[in-house]
Image (tube, grey):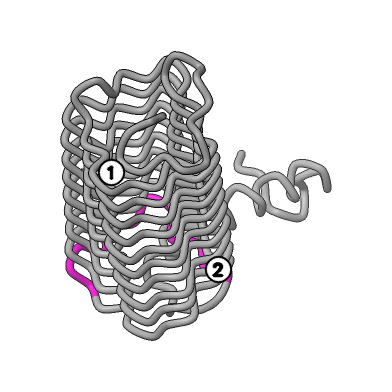
């Protein structure tokens, strides 16, 4: 004989209601309207338009947003961890403290985006465009940034340790106190960049270009920079690969 709801013990009844409530939420979440704190985890929004939407504190982990458009959106504290963001546009978006750990964002555009204190460790960002972005104190630890663009970006105290930024372009970027320890810098351009007190210890700078860069008090301890270009670079009190401290008058060559 089947039990009626009236005959089910109270504890079991609450369990049944909880399970069915969870199932309903799982199926309806992807249809929820764009709003702060929305939960779109694991949803598929390929090619969707979210321009100027407020999605702060939202949960997007594991979701697919390939070719989507978040231009001008508010994404503060939003969680995109492990999401797919290939060729997605974030131009002009406000994304402080956004979480983008291990995302697949090859070819994504972050032009003029606010990314201060953002977390992008182990992200796949090959050919991504961060031109004009403001990403002070962001984390790109162990990120794949081959051929990425950081032209005119502000990256003070940003962490690129163990990252691969080969062929990336940091021309005129502001990188004071940025960290490139153990980073791969093959053919990377830092032309005219501001890099005072930047840390490039143990980095692999094969054919990297630091022409006209300001490297005052920067550190290259044990870095591979024999084939790097420093034409016109300011090397005032810079620490060289052999631990030598460059003279204050050093320009282009560590004296």
The prevailing secondary structure element of the residues shown in magenta is: loop
- Residue at 16% over, 45% down: 147
Relative depth, front residue between 14 and 81: 81
| Residue 120: x %, y % from top left | 44, 45
Q: Which of the 4 image quarters holds residue 82?
A: top left
Tell me the residue that label 1 is attached to.
210
Start and end of the magenta stretch?
37-48
For the point 38% across and 65% down, the residue is 30
Which of labels 1 and 2 is toward the front? 1
* Total tally of numbered discs in the picture: 2
Quarter of the image where the C terminus is located: top left
Q: Is residue 171 left or right of residue 116?
A: left
Q: Is residue 48 left or right of residue 143?
A: left
**Residue 44 counted in the magenta span:** yes
* Residue that sits furthest to the right in the current view: 10
- Number of residues whose C-alpha sits closer than 10 Å to that of mark 2, classed few (under 14), some (14–19) or many (20 or more): many
Give 179 or 192, whichever is nearer the viewer: 192
Q: Is residue 150 above or below residue 133?
A: above
Sequence order check, earlier mark of 1 and 2: 2
Residue at 57%, 55% in the rendered image: 117
Above or below: residue 12 compared with residue 194? above
Which percent across, then down, holds residue 99? 50, 51
Q: Give the alpha-carbon distance from disc 1 to disc 2, as whole Å.
A: 34 Å
Q: Residue at x 75, y 41 (%)?
A: 12
Above/below status of 52 relative to 102 = below
Which numbered marker is on residue 76?
Answer: 2
Q: CB of mark 1 within 8 Å of CB of mark 2?
A: no
Front residue of 55/128: it is 128
The x and y percentages for residue 75 are 49, 70
Q: Secondary structure at mark 1?
A: loop
């Amino acid at each position: 004989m089947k039990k009626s709801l009236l005959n089910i013990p109270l504890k079991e009844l609450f369990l049944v209601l909880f399970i069915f409530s969870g199932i309903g939420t799982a199926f309806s979440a992807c249809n929820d309207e764009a709003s702060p704190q929305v939960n779109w985890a694991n949803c598929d929004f390929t090619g969707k338009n979210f321009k100027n939407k407020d999605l702060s504190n939202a949960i997007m982990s594991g979701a697919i947003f390939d070719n989507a458009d978040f231009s001008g959106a508010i994404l503060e504290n939003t969680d995109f961890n492990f999401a797919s963001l290939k060729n997605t546009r974030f131009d002009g978006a406000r994304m402080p403290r956004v979480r983008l750990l291990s995302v697949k964002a090859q070819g994504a555009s972050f032009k003029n985006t606010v990314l201060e204190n953002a977390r992008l460790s182990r992200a796949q960002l090959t050919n991504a465009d961060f031109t004009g972005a403001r990403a002070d104190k962001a984390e790109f630890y162990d990120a794949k940034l081959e051929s990425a663009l950081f032209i005119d970006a502000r990256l003070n105290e940003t962490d690129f340790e163990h990252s691969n930024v080969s062929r990336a372009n940091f021309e005129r970027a502001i990188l004071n106190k940025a960290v490139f320890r153990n980073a791969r810098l093959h053919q990377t351009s830092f032309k005219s960049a501001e890099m005072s007190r930047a840390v490039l210890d143990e980095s692999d700078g094969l054919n990297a270009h630091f022409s006209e860069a300001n490297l005052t008090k920067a550190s290259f301890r044990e870095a591979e920079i024999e084939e790097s270009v420093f034409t016109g670079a300011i090397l005032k009190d810079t620490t060289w690969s052999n631990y030598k401290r460059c003279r204050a008058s050093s320009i282009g060559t560590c004296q």
